[in-house]
Image: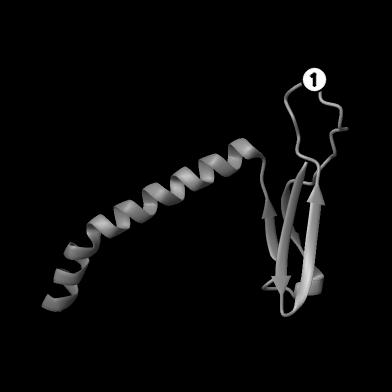
Amino acid sequence: MLLVTRVNGGRRLALHASAIMDDSSATEPVSQVYTGVWTNWSRGKVNGSTITLTRNDANLLIAFLAFFIAWGESQSPFINRWCAVR
């Protein structure tokens, strides 16, 4: 079971979702969660744009972003030099 609580502008928002468990002896039922791109219209078109990923896909996305950010930071001296010459 996963419980996420967030305070938003004085209002307390709570999200409760059953975690998908690999253990077949789990007593809680496994809930079906939509994966993909969707919009939370209560937050508007831009702020409500959401993507829901499986755990494996999310781990892959995090690893890619970490690699991309590290690579970009390693290239910043070259980019700064190139901009200074122009």
Q: Quadrant of residue 83?
A: bottom left
Which residue: 84% across, 33% down? 30
Quadrant of the rendering where the C terminus is positioned: bottom left
Q: Could you tell me residue 66's position as x and y percent?
A: 41, 49
Give how far across and how far down residue 43 sits, in percent: 75, 73
The spot of residue 4 in percent (x, y) is 72, 55
Q: How many marks?
A: 1
Can I make out residue 48 in this image?
Answer: no
What residue sits 67% from the left and 40% below the top? 54
Residue 44 against residue 73 in the figure, above or below: below
Residue at the image position 67 percent from the left and 72 percent from the top: 47
Tell me which amino acid carries mark 1: Ser
Q: Nearer the viewer, residue 27 or 86?
A: 27
Question: Taking the image as drawn, is residue 32 in sight?
Answer: yes
Depth check, front residue: 20 or 39: 20
The residue most toward the top is 25
- To which residue does mark 1 refer? 24
Relative horizontal placement of residue 86, taking residue 33 as reference (left or right): left
Residue at image point 78% right, 70% down: 12
